[in-house]
Image: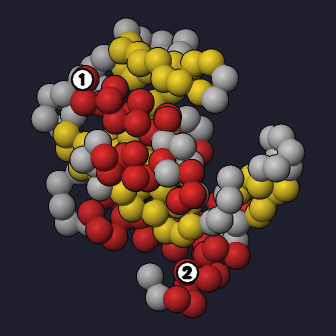
Amino acid sequence: MDARRHIALKESIRSIPDYPKPGIIFRDITTLLSDPRAFRRAVDALVHPYAGGRIDQVAGIEARGFILGGAVAHQLSSGFVPIRKKGKLPHKTVSIAYALEYGTDEIEIHVDAIKPGDRVLLVDDLIATGGTAMAAVNLLRRIGAEVVAACFVIDLPEIGGAQRLRDLDVPVRTLMEFDGH
């Protein structure tokens, strides 16, 4: 992506200070999603490295990963698989617990969503600590997926989540970085 387009895409992100708590700057992609050109550019940039390759499924992490992942899956002519918070999927599931700053949470996927050996691209809006994304990778691998890469619109590199995914041998693609938390 050339520098002018990268700047324009980054400018489509709304920054909200002190949300959800003081000291945090929330990077809101809803402004990017509502701008047709920015949304298209972001999806095209996420898709580009994988176009023409074999991606069987795109897995999106609840909830903004559903929006981006669905669009990416459409462009790649792949299936889409939602990774949801525990208790939201209607069929038999496989789940994994992961650590939060204070406590734990669980995500799950339908047990039959991925066939062993499926090549899967993981998509979400932002990578911060990487906790949810690492849990998603482990969950996908548990049911036989080959996680080809993980893609995010935004990286907060100071927090280290993208590197944690790389340490799991998952290539990471991000479209932009923001300083801070």
Residue type indicated by callout 1:
Ile
Q: Residue at x 77, y 55 (%)?
A: 25
Q: Considering depth in this image, is 166 or 14 the residue closer to the camera? A: 166
The tag on residue 6 is 2
Q: Quick one: label 2 or label 1, which is nearer the N terminus?
A: 2
Q: Residue 160 at x, y = what percent?
A: 49, 51
Q: Considering depth in this image, is 99 or 59 the residue closer to the camera? A: 99
Residue type indicated by callout 2:
His
Q: Considering depth in this image, is 108 or 169 the residue closer to the camera? A: 169
Q: What is the count of numbered marks?
A: 2
Q: Residue 175 at x, y = what percent?
A: 49, 68
Residue at numbered disc 1? 143
The answer to whether residue 56 is seen in the rendering is no
Q: Residue 46 at x, y = what percent?
A: 41, 64
Crowd rating for badge 1 (residues with CA inside 10 Å; few <14, some 14–19, many 20+): some
Tell me where residue 12 sits by quadrant. Answer: bottom right
Crowd rating for badge 2 (residues with CA inside 10 Å; few <14, some 14–19, many 20+): some
The answer to whether residue 151 is seen in the rendering is yes
Left or right placement of residue 21 versus residue 32 in this view: right
- The kind of secondary structure element at disc 1 is loop
Which residue in the rendered view is the most extreme toward the top? 92
Tell me where residue 147 sits by quadrant. Answer: top left
- The kind of secondary structure element at disc 2 is helix
